[in-house]
Image (spheres, grey):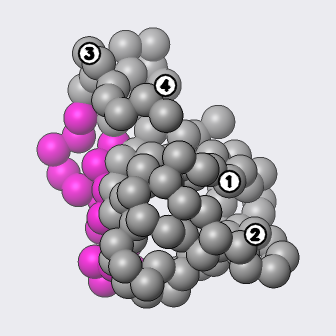
Amino acid sequence: MKMEFKNVSVGKKANIYFEGKCISHTVTLPDGIRKSVGVVLPSTLRFDLTTREVMEVVDGVANVSINGSPEQPFHSGQSWTVDAGGYFVIRAELPVHYVCHFE
C-alpha cells in the first residue's frame, strides 16, 4: 500500500457527510484521476454509489456489508470494491482512515 501521493492538488474545502461522521478531502492526481482521503468516525453509515469505488483502509478496522452481504472486517492494507448502483454499509468502532479510488 502506497502511503503518499506525489504532485497532487488537494481541495481546500472538506467533504463532510453524515453530520461530520465521515470527513474527506478530494485529491486530484497529475493525470486527472480523482480520489478522496478521509476518516470515518465511530458510527454505522450507508453509502449509495453512482460510480464504481474501491475503498482502501489505511488505518483501523472497517466492518463492511456490500449490497446486503454478511458483514466482514477490512484491516489496514485491505480494500473492497463496489460497482456503480451498489451500496455498502460501514461500521466503525474506532476511527477508520481510508482512500476512496473512483473508477
> Residue 91, image x and y in percent?
54, 81
Residue segment shown in magenta:
10-26
Crowdedness of circle 3 by 10 Å Cα count: few (<14), some, many (20+)?
few
Label 2 element class: strand
Residue shown at the point (25%, 26%) measured from the top left: 9
Q: Which residue is mark 2?
A: 66
Question: Is residue 22 among what the camera can see?
Answer: no
The alpha-carbon separation of the residues under discs 2 and 1 comes to 9 Å
> Residue 2, image x and y in percent?
43, 29
N-term-proximal mark, 1 vs 3: 3
Q: Which residue is mark 1?
A: 80
N-term-proximal mark, 4 vs 2: 4
Residue shown at the point (53%, 46%) measured from the top left: 77
- Decide whether residue 23 is among the magenta residues: yes
The alpha-carbon separation of the residues under discs 1 and 4 comes to 19 Å
N-term-proximal mark, 2 vs 1: 2
Label 4 element class: loop
N-term-proximal mark, 2 vs 3: 3
> Residue 100, image x and y in percent?
50, 47
* Residue type, mark 1 in image: Trp
* Residue type, mark 3 in image: Asn
Image marks 2 and 3: residues in contact by CB distance under 8 Å: no
Label 1 element class: strand
The answer to which image quadrant residue 86 occupies is bottom right
- Decide whether residue 57 is among the magenta residues: no
Image marks 1 and 3: residues in contact by CB distance under 8 Å: no
Q: Which residue is mark 3?
A: 7
N-term-proximal mark, 1 vs 4: 4
Frontmost of labels 1 and 4 is 1
Crowdedness of circle 1 by 10 Å Cα count: few (<14), some, many (20+)?
some
* Residue type, mark 2 in image: Ile
